[in-house]
Amino acid sequence: MAVDSFPILCDLDGVVWLAHEPIVGSADAVQRLRAAGHRVLFVTNNSASRVAEQQAALARIGVDAHGDVLTSAMAAALLVEPGERVLVCGGAGIVEAIEQRGAFVSTEANVDAVMVGFHRNFDYEIMRVAADAVRAGARLIGTNDDATYPTPHGVIPGGGAILAGIAVASGVTPLIAGKPHAPMAALVRVETGRDDLSAAVMVGDRPETDGLFARTLGCRYAQVWSGVTAEGTLVSPTPDLSGDNLAAIADLVLRR
């Protein structure tokens, strides 16, 4: 890595793509940033897909992301110990992360933790079983608490909406792993090998998630208007950079 280079942390949904449909200029922006010596990491709260599936989806839009995808499922797995039993209310990405951690996915009611993420087959029975396990003593872990999820056709309920139902039903406040919380920050620091990330840039479309995550890391925040936040919205925290999309942010970074 060049002396004057620094990590660029990119959200995926709303920054690189919308439901895997690429945002104009995003793939080229990644290539330009890498050519300038910056490592580009994709830091996503999406926990539904396996890492290889996310890497393959990025490859289809012209982005090589091998070894550069960090998910909220990976961060959530840091909150369980090897050998523990986990009830999963989420997608295959959570199962993968738990197994790589050395913990076990269980369908039994007597588990050590319940881990919740975005999935499209959530229903009342899933909520009942999960809430019962939490009331019996299992820790409630959310991969993220994003209320919505951006798609090319508008926003839909996100993993946080599912988690909220289980939290209310069980009466327990969940532990949250993904952006903007500490477990994801720990994952980024391990992957970059840097404790001091003040020079890094977090590029996101959601200030309450990506912006606050930049503050958790102590790095700069770049706000894009290509996702859930409309251009002209007064956002907090105040971004250090802003632009229409990732391509515009790359222009600003490279110009500086």
Image: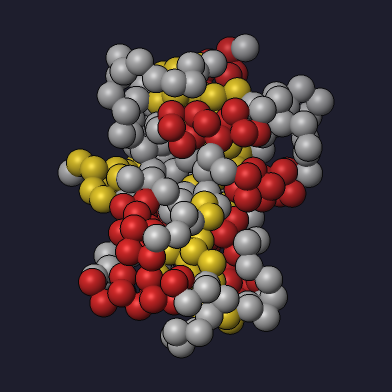
Quarter location, residue 38: top right
Query: Residue 104's x, y, as percent?
Result: 58, 81
| For residue 123, side relative to residue 227 (left or right) | left
| For residue 73, side relative to residue 2 (left or right) | left
Determine the residue positioned at 48% across, 40% down. Answer: 11
Say above or below: 25 vs 56.
Answer: above
Q: How many marks?
A: 0
Say above or below: 20 vs 220.
Answer: below
Q: Nearer the viewer, residue 253 or 96?
A: 96
Q: In which quadrant will I find the N terminus? A: top right
Query: Residue 91's x, y, as percent?
Result: 40, 68
Display coloring: secondary structure
Determine the residue positioned at 51% across, 61% down. Answer: 141
Q: Nearer the viewer, residue 172 or 40?
A: 172
Extreme-top residue of the structure:
256
Q: From this viewpoint, is residue 131 visible?
A: yes
Query: Residue 243's x, y, as percent?
Result: 41, 19
Q: From this viewpoint, is residue 36 visible?
A: no
| For residue 99, side relative to residue 241 (left or right) | right
Say above or below: 93 vs 33.
Answer: below
Determine the residue positioned at 54% across, 24% down. Answer: 221
Extreme-left residue of the structure:
153
Q: Nearer the viewer, residue 5 or 62?
A: 5
Determine the residue positioned at 58% across, 72% down. Answer: 98
Say above or below: 80 vs 210.
Answer: below
Q: Nearer the viewer, residue 44 or 216?
A: 216
Extreme-right residue of the structure:
3
Query: Residue 255's x, y, as percent?
Result: 58, 12
Q: In which quadrant will I find the C terminus? A: top right
